[in-house]
Amino acid sequence: MQISSRFTIAIHILTCIDTFKDDYKVTSDFLAGSINVNPVVIRRLLQQLKAAGIVNVIRGSGGAEIAKPLSEITMLDIYKAVDSIENGSLFHFHENPNKECPVGRNIHNVLDDKLNQIQTAMENEMRSITIQEIVEETKKYIQEE
Amino acid sequence: MQISSRFTIAIHILTCIDTFKDDYKVTSDFLAGSINVNPVVIRRLLQQLKAAGIVNVIRGSGGAEIAKPLSEITMLDIYKAVDSIENGSLFHFHENPNKECPVGRNIHNVLDDKLNQIQTAMENEMRSITIQEIVEETKKYIQEE
DNA sequence: AGCGGGTGTAATGTCAATTATTACAACAAG
DNA sequence: CTTGTTGTAATAATTGACATTACACCCGCT
């Protein structure tokens, strides 16, 4: 299965907040309009991003803002904040290898290392990309329209 | 969501085939016993591995064997063979960003590059690990028991 | 030739996760 | 105290993963 669209939606959310922060009050309804999902989905994601210290959400009067410099927010931060995968493990290991079988009882030990190695490579790449790059490139695209 | 357990099961299959090739006829039932899944799951995976040229499956008398040197089979080969993810894309992009919104109609262009970059990092790491390493380490674990 | 163990595959069922949606209490500002 | 908004629970629809049954087909053996 693929990594949840919560991840790309969260990136879209942050990009919108920054892009429109001076011209609009960026509410969950506003964001839902650009992303084309239900506002409740946005609110839940905003809660998760808030818990990670990435955004502030203004209750009552409404709106969301980004809580720290864009250059300090990496893809990995977002990825982790919105629980893109379960238990933090990218791979779903088959649960019950047979302990009676020599391979069955050892495969987990051998594979876990390798799977971690792969996942780490992915996470390192994520850490190297900031939301600032995304926002800047998006602005460039918009200007060129 | 996580990457399907088909991936780890396929690795388990190959490890078993090699480990037991001299002592048993390695049938789908035999493999199902070590992995603890239904034999039909094994047969479907064997078909996919066969389509990728990784194994031969002997119809009639039964059994499976590995079709090429272990050192030439990488994690990436297996990963691709068993369709661990859909459409080859690790990330599920939210489908319908609003084309009326400047961010909505450009985010796909910007993000696709970055997502590919991340996925490529993962795939490169997968390419660097061969099933031979897995088999050898597993044998080492078994001997030390 | 036919038996028996095995594969290939379709059909069906179950379960869990994702996403959508409704509903409403809590809240803040005018 | 009204209005627009957030926070969150409850529920449903959809989808995909995995399990399982069933059975035709295949091939070596006697």
Image (cartoon, coloured by chain):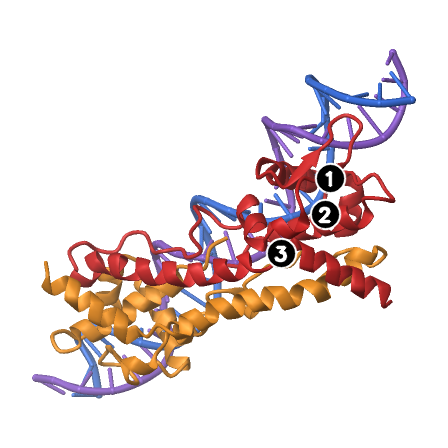
Chain colours: A red, B orange, C blue, D purple
Residue corresponding to mark 2:
A37
Secondary structure under tag 3 reads loop
Q: Amino acid at mark 1?
A: Glu
Residue positioned 11% across, 75% down in the render: B23
Left or right, A87 with respect to A79, comes to: left
Q: Nearer the viewer, residue A129 or B88?
A: A129
Q: Amino acid at mark 3?
A: Thr
Residue A55: assigned label: none
Marks 3 and 2 on same chain:
yes
- Please state the total of marks drawn on the protein image: 3
Residue corresponding to mark 1:
A65
Location of residue A78 in the rendering, given as x and y in whole percent from the top left corner? 59, 49
Task: Kindly report which numbered mark, 2 or 1, lies closer to the viewer in this rendering.
Answer: 1
Residue corresponding to mark 3:
A130
Location of residue A33 in the rendering, given as x and y in whole percent from the top left corner? 80, 47
Do the numbered discs 3 and 2 sit on residues whose CB atoms are within 8 Å?
Answer: no
Q: Amino acid at mark 2?
A: Val
**Which of the two discs, 1 and 3, labels the residue nearer the N terminus?**
1
**Which of the two discs, 2 and 1, labels the residue nearer the N terminus?**
2
The residues tagged by marks 3 and 2 sit, at their Cα atoms, a distance apart of 24 Å
Left or right, B116 with respect to A1, comes to: right
